[in-house]
Image: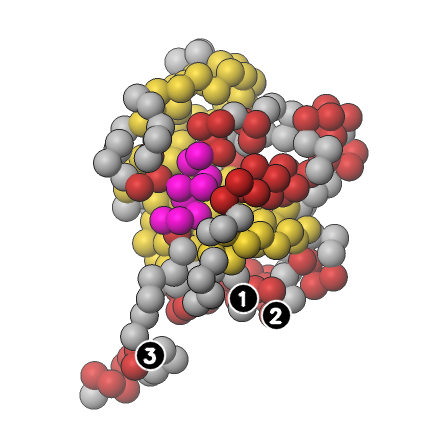
Amino acid sequence: MADKIRVTIWNEFRHEKTDANAKALYPLGIHGTIKEFLGKYDDEIEVTLAALDDSDQGLPDEVLYNTDVLMWWGHMAHGEVNDELVAKIRNRVYDDGMGFIAMHSAHFSKPFRSIVGTSGKLLWGDEQQELIWNVLPAHPIAAGIPEHFDLGTEEMYGEPFMIPQPDELVFVGWFKHGYVFRSGCTFFRGRGKVFYFQPGHETEGAFHNPYVQRILYNAIKWAKPNEFGDKMHDCDYRANLL
Ligand code: ZN
């Protein structure tokens, strides 16, 4: 692994071209905005941007296989993502330990559902005030985050959220109209680490919130692949047991 964490931020990048509100909030695109705030960590993190309409849907092999942590934002075009690419992403997590960070509506993305193995359905509702509660303050992803913070207005995502029981629950979202949501969850899959984080609707300002920015930075550091012994790499596990 290179010294810097090689992060690829994949964005569907459609709303920011067609929706005036999304464009005004994220003129660089959501991926460009994330890259911008990660810039202050450029001694630790190297960022590549990828979008659905790029060639090879933004993830040709030379990008995917040189990515330590893949961040994913998608919403209106989940179905357009190539199934062969989804399988490659899943296998890169399972077999190579690539980190995967699914943001907001990526709960319904093909890669997230394929990696965690459930539908990702949830209760959905109107935008309203949300507080994010830090329920696992000892977790590396919670570093620097207070007991709770006010996200302002965000699209409501509620329970039940059709995910497997998370390996760790780091954040819980509380919505003004009474709903709650498992807003920050981790999953260990094969050799890889997965973080799902709920804030980030395209017409709300979550990616400008300093705590959201810190959480995503923490998540990148947490999700980077472990160093694995060469001996295990690419072996046939079953054969080794015989
Ligand atoms: Zn949304």
Along the polypeptide, which appears first: circle 1 or circle 3? Answer: 1
Which quadrant of the rendered structure holds the C terminus? Answer: bottom left
Q: Find the distance from the CA under tag 1 to the CA under tag 2.
A: 6 Å
Q: Residue at the top extreme?
A: 177
Which quadrant of the rendered structure holds the N terminus? Answer: bottom left
Q: Is residue 111 left or right of residue 75?
A: left
For label 1, the residue is 66
Along the polypeptide, which appears first: circle 2 or circle 3? Answer: 2
Task: Give how far across and how far down residue 107 sits, in percent.
Answer: 49, 41
For label 2, the residue is 62
Bounds of the magenta span? 214-222
The amino acid type found where label 1 is placed reads Asn
Q: Is mark 1 within 8 Å of ligand 1?
A: no
The amino acid type found where label 3 is placed reads Asp
Q: Is residue 228 left or right of residue 35?
A: left
* Residue 180 visible to the viewer: no
Task: Give how far across and how far down residue 233 sits, in percent.
Answer: 36, 78
Cβ–Cβ below 8 Å for labels 1 and 2? Answer: yes
For label 3, the residue is 230
The amino acid type found where label 2 is placed reads Glu
